[in-house]
């Protein structure tokens, strides 16, 4: 079974690599300004060059932080999951994430670039805090992406094994559903030919989903073919 450290397992050659600096998210590269890049270099190299997913993973495995710029377009947060799995502290404004915003623990949230720089200085001055935040993010990734899905699959499998479902019962249920659908369509056609309205159809017990346009009577279809 995989875990929240899967990216590290994929690249064992980086297992003992010394970490430093920041890996920018894909969309952050397009909005970061040269002066901001220079400011970020206070905390080590700023990695922005890659051509493939593997390159991004290698950049993350060598970085202390993974950063989403405050002006970056909104993202799903999947990149943060990969970064946490690679061992980075994921830094992103919660408002820039439309999914998995809980990955950004409150003490790591920021809204502006100046707030990001201040946060980085705090983390650099307190490595234990940075490690604690990374462990908390990693625990959440482990639960959401691995432990909980695995538990749900096991529960579903056990439920299926303990159920009384058989191929014969499945076939019977499908046949009943087909017969019911045909009956509803037939009742609809009859009601339409008799000039029924939606109100009248409701009184006859025809469900709204089955009140579509009825096909033309067969005689009218033949006449339309002759006119063409």
Image (cartoon, helix red, strand yellow):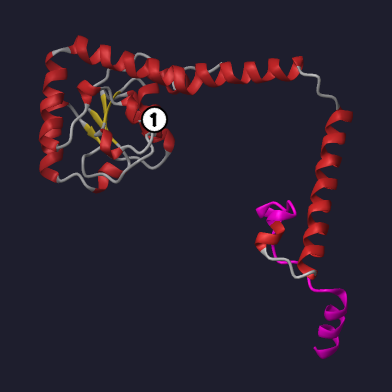
User: Label 1 belongs to which residue?
Assistant: 57
Q: Residue at x 35, y 13 (%)?
A: 16
Q: In which quarter of the image is the N terminus?
A: top right
What is the quadrant of residue 21 in the picture? top left
Residue 94, image x, y percentages: 27, 33
Q: Residue at x 21, y 44 (%)?
A: 71
Q: Which residue is drawn at 39% across and 15% down?
A: 139
Residue 203, image x, y percentages: 71, 54
Residue furthest bottom in the image: 227
201 lies left or right of 69? right
Q: In which quarter of the image is the C terminus?
A: bottom right
Q: Is mark 1 on a helix, strand or loop?
A: helix
Report the magenta residues as a range.
Answer: 202-228
Q: Is residue 210 magenta?
A: yes
The correct choice, above or below, for 73 with respect to 193 in the image is above
108 lies left or right of 152? left
- 59 or 200, nearer to the observer: 200
Residue 35, image x, y percentages: 10, 42
What is the quadrant of residue 215 in the picture? bottom right
What is the quadrant of residue 165 in the picture? top right
Residue 8 appears in the figure: no
Residue furthest top in the image: 128
- 29 or 174, nearer to the observer: 174
The correct choice, above or below, for 95 with respect to 220 in the image is above
Instruction: Count every numbered label the image shows and give the total.
Output: 1
Q: Which residue is drawn at 48% across and 23% down?
A: 145
């Amino acid at each position: 079974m995989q875990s929240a450290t899967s990216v590290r397992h994929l690249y064992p050659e980086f297992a003992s690599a010394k970490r430093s600096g920041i890996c920018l998210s894909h969309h952050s590269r397009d909005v970061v300004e040269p002066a901001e890049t220079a400011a970020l270099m206070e905390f080590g190299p700023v990695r922005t060059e890659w051509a493939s997913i593997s390159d991004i993973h290698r950049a993350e495995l060598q970085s202390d932080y993974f950063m989403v710029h405050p002006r970056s377009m909104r993202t799903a947060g999947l990149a943060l999951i990969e970064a946490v799995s690679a061992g980075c502290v994921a830094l992103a404004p919660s408002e820039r994430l439309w999914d998995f915003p809980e990955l950004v623990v409150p003490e790591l949230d920021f809204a502006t670039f100046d707030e990001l720089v201040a946060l980085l200085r705090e983390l650099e001055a307190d490595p234990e805090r940075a490690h604690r935040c990374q462990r908390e993010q990693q625990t959440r990734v482990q639960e959401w992406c691995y432990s909980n899905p695995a538990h749900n699959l096991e529960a579903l499998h056990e439920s299926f094994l303990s159920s009384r479902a058989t191929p014969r019962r499945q076939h019977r249920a499908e046949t009943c559903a087909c017969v019911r659908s045909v009956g509803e369509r037939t009742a609809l056609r009859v009601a339409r030919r008799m000039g029924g309205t939606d109100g009248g159809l409701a009184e006859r017990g025809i469900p709204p989903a089955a009140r579509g346009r009825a096909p033309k009577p067969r005689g009218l279809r033949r006449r339309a073919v002759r006119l063409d």
